[in-house]
Image (spheres, coloured by chain):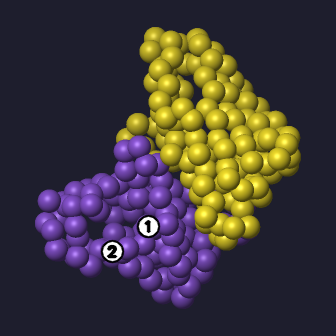
Amino acid sequence: GQQVMQIPQYQHVQEGEDFTTYCNSSTTLSNIQWYKQRPGGHPVFLIQLVKSGEVKKQKRLTFQFGEAKKNSSLHITATQTTDVGTYFCAGLSRNSGYALNFGKGTSLLVTP
Amino acid sequence: NAGVTQTPKFQVLKTGQSMTLQCAQDMNHEYMSWYRQDPGMGLRLIHYSVGAGITDQGEVPNGYNVSRSTTEDFPLRLLSAAPSQTSVYFCASRGQGLSSPLHFGNGTRLTVT
């Protein structure tokens, strides 16, 4: 079945440094969604990418969807302590039917 | 709107006990689902439902039952709890369309001893 791989599993940065997490799917995706989970909290939807090569920005966060719609990335510029949490990508494809397949997430720790 | 409400927030069970995790949403969402989250494993889909009376298995369905008698409620049943079911459980729903975002509940932390 479809698998969504996400790397790295953990990332520890100093405040002000940049951060990137990558997602790769074994199959072509219809769309990809990104979620953020704060420590002790629940996942919260950030954004969705649908088009091949799409790039979207939310303040310091930049999301990209690959040309082949098999990979995606989330880049955070100049991290802040409020960015701490786990970032998940989740892909939807014909093979997955109605269900989103989540990557295992990247846990980001930001030290001041 | 309360969104997605899960109860209880915490639960401790002994091996072999049964219990039901409750999930309710007030957004009139047709799609509802249950995930479990374990360290290093991400979110794994247990069961999902695309509407009242319709349920289907996800990635890790063994040991869990679900039913969907109403649009609002989607309970998850553990018939005979096992230590391997110690986890954090999230219920999530989404609105019309496959590309709608998931709305998660606050989670239930379950420990089976």
Q: Is residue A105 left or right of residue B101?
A: left
Residue lying at 47% horizontally and 30% vertically, measured from the top left = A10
On the same chain: label 2 and label 1? yes
Instruction: Using a 10 Å C-alpha cutoff, classify the residue at mark 1 as few (fewer than 14 neighbours), some (14 to 19) or many (20 or more).
Output: few
Quadrant holding the N terminus of chain B: bottom right
Residue lying at 58% horizontally and 11% vertically, measured from the top left = A16
- For the colour purple, the matching chain is B
Which residue carries the number 1 mark? B60
Quadrant holding the C terminus of chain B: bottom left
Q: Position of residue A92 (x, y in %)?
A: 69, 59
Disc 1 marks which amino acid? Val
Labels in figure, total: 2
- For the colour yellow, the matching chain is A
From mark 2 to mark 1, how far is it between C-alphas? 9 Å
Which residue carries the number 2 mark? B63
Camera-side residue of B54 and B95: B54
Camera-side residue of B5 and B37: B37
Chain under numbered label 1: B
Disc 2 marks which amino acid? Gly
Residue lying at 56% horizontally and 85% vertically, measured from the top left = B54
Secondary element under disc 2, as helix, strand or loop, is loop
**Quarter of the view holding residue A54:** top right
Secondary element under disc 1, as helix, strand or loop, is loop
Q: Which mark is residue B10?
A: none
